[in-house]
Image (tube, helix red, strand yellow):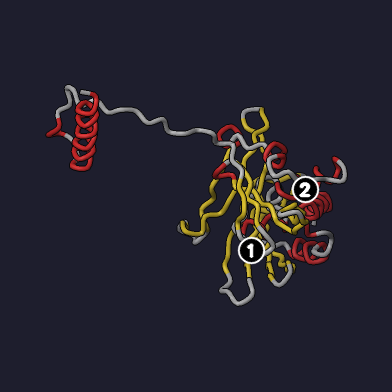
């Protein structure tokens, strides 16, 4: 067993939130020399349970005369109380990926924010799992919402909710929790009294959603300020026979409305 390889892997899984509890099992399986193996772990989040199967495999090329092991993917099983368990595989790149809490939040259908390098630049995106769409391996589709399309600024959107913070550090902690996919508990002022509420990110609208203590939506913010501007439809030079029936009806209604206006004026 290559000690450098072991140290690299143990540090990688620690950064992913597994701590050092898997190190002995990792060392043992590396020493056995299998080309592929897995190490399992589990964690509780309230009443929910996550089981993680970390899948390791040897690379094709040799380093220092040996084939190195790499952590290639993590398959999770999400067991929610009184519901059927679901599974999902998360791929890793150079030992980097979603940590244990982020994977739990994704399985809870909440978005998680990640930065990555593309063409020499840092690119940010929100990631969300779409369980209504599955691939050939029965994995939920991954939906991505990039910074340059959502225009989502967490600090700006938080300001729209009129929340109060003891200090800047408390606000930064809230923003960090939101990026990890948490629905964060906050205190709001309603009808002259303080109430407990929860705030979560909705990248599809470029904003936030505020829930009451019963997780019912009470407010949402949005960075999308685009509105449709209505205009009159001119029927001149339109070949109506080529239009769909619904469009023909719309044009007829528009024509009748315009004719009625002319009669009132005259």
Residue furthest to the bottom in view is 82
Nearer-the-camera pick, 63 or 200: 200
- Check disc 2: other Cα within 10 Å, few if <14, some if 14-19, many if 20+: many
Can you say which quadrant of the picture contains the N terminus? bottom right
Residue neighbourhood size for the residue with mark 1, other residues' Cα within 10 Å, grouped as few (<14), some (14–19), many (≥20): many
Image quarter in which the C terminus is found = top left
Please tell me which residue lies in front, 202 or 110.
202
Left or right relative to 247: residue 134: right
Q: Is 179 located above or below residue 259 in the figure?
A: below
Residue at horizontal 77 percent and vertical 44 percent from the top: 64
Tell which of 172 and 188 is nearer to you: 188
Residue 107 screen position, x and y as percent = 61, 60
Could you tell me which residue is drawn at 63 percent across and 71 percent down? 80
| Image height of 231 relative to 32, above or below | above
In this rendered view, identify the residue nearer to me: 245 or 189.
189
Image position of 18 (left or right of 34): right
Location of residue 55 (image quadrant) = bottom right
Give the CA separation, mark 2 to mark 1.
27 Å
For the image, the number of numbered tags is: 2
Q: Position of residue 16 (x, y in %)?
A: 75, 53
Q: Which corner quadrant of the image does residue 110 belong to?
A: bottom right
Which badge, 2 or 1, comes first in the chain's sequence?
A: 1
Say the numbered circle drawn on residue 174: 2
Q: At 66% from the left edge and 34% from the top edge, which residue is drawn?
A: 117
Residue 210 screen position, x and y as percent: 65, 52
Q: SS of the residue at dot 1?
A: strand
Label 2 element class: helix
Residue 116: x percent and y percent?
66, 38
User: Do labels 2 and 1 touch, CB within 8 Å?
Assistant: no
89 lies above or below 229: below
Q: Which mark is residue 76?
A: 1
């Amino acid at each position: 067993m290559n000690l450098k390889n072991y140290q690299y892997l143990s540090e990688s899984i620690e950064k992913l939130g597994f701590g050092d509890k898997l190190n002995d099992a990792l060392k043992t399986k590396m020493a056995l020399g299998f080309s592929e193996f897995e190490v399992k772990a589990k964690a509780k989040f309230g009443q929910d349970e996550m089981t993680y199967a970390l899948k390791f495999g040897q690379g094709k090329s040799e380093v220092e005369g040996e084939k190195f092991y790499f952590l290639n993917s993590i398959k999770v099983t999400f067991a929610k109380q009184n519901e059927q368990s679901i599974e999902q595989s998360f791929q890793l790149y150079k030992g980097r990926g979603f940590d244990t809490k982020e994977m739990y939040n994704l399985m809870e259908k909440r978005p998680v924010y990640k930065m990555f390098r593309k063409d020499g630049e840092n690119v940010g995106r929100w990631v969300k799992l779409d369980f209504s769409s599955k691939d050939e391996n029965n994995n939920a589709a991954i939906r991505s919402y990039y910074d340059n399309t959502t225009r989502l600024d967490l600090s700006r959107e938080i300001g729209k909710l009129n929340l109060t913070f003891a200090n800047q550090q408390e606000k930064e902690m809230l923003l960090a929790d939101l990026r990890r996919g948490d629905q964060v508990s906050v205190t709001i002022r309603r009808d002259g009294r303080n109430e407990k509420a929860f705030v979560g990110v909705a990248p599809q609208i470029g904003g936030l959603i505020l829930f009451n203590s019963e997780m019912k939506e009470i407010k949402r913010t949005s960075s999308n300020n685009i509105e449709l501007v209505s205009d009159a439809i001119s029927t001149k030079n339109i070949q109506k026979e080529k239009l769909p029936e619904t469009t023909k009806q719309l044009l007829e209604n528009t024509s009748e409305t315009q004719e009625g206006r002319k009669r009132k004026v005259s």
